[in-house]
Amino acid sequence: KIYSPFSKYKWISNCKAHHYLGYNQLPWTGDKIIITKSLKDVAVLSLFNLPAIAPQSESQVISHEMYTKLQKRFTKFYVLYDNDAAGIAGAMETVETYPDIIPIFIPKESKVKDISDFIDEYRYRATKELIKKLI
């Protein structure tokens, strides 16, 4: 994925919809898995031993095939997208498709929209406390 802020297209990529960031790093089984929106969020969650994957965008609902694979490996599902309009809409679409997925969001009062911004702003301990509250 290449970020092109001054181009007609913000992101240019040769990744396909069936590529999920972080998938190859997942443990074989686990209690929880988080569907998030970017590789940097997957990396932050891994600091807290939370397995996570990210589709190519917040507007992409994970495929039924991927969901079925993950159901065989994990018990509880969460979706953690940005707490802006696009992220909330994407999370709600995911929950409508898969009602057992629990939507979680970074609190608006933190004035950041994702977990990677949160850890940057508030550091490790505060992020750990936030995750305990959310999950």
Image (cartoon, rainbow, N blue to C red):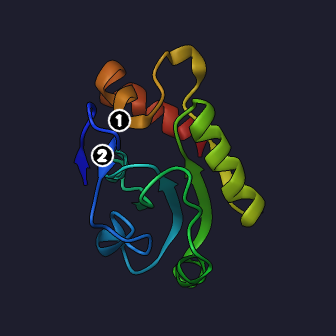
Residue placed most toward the observer, 94 or 43 = 94
Label 2 sits on residue = 40
Give amino acid for label 1: Ser
Q: Position of residue 38 (x, y in %)?
A: 37, 49
Name the quadrant of the N terminus.
Answer: bottom left
Residue 38 falls left or right of residue 129: left
Q: Residue shown at 42%/56% (left/top)?
A: 50
Residue 26: which disc?
Answer: none
Residue placed most toward the observer, 132 or 56 = 56
Q: Which secondary structure, mark 2?
A: helix
Q: Is residue 55 above or below residue 72?
A: above
Q: Position of residue 119 (x, y in %)?
A: 34, 29
The quadrant holding residue 52 is bottom left
Residue placed most toward the observer, 79 or 30 = 79
Q: Could you tell me how far apart the alpha carbons at marks 1 and 2 are, in whole angstroms? A: 6 Å
Q: Is residue 76 above or below residue 125?
A: below
Residue 111 falls left or right of residue 15: right
Residue placed most toward the observer, 31 or 107 = 107
Q: Residue shown at 47%/31% (left/top)?
A: 129
Residue 97 falls left or right of residue 16: right
Q: Position of residue 48 (x, y in %)?
A: 36, 48
Q: Is residue 31 above or below residue 82?
A: below
Q: Are marks 1 and 2 in contact (CB under 8 Å)?
A: yes
Give amino acid for label 2: Lys
Q: Residue shown at 51%/80% (left/top)?
A: 73
The quadrant holding residue 16 is bottom left
Label 1 sits on residue = 116
The residue furthest front is 8
Q: Which secondary structure, mark 1?
A: helix
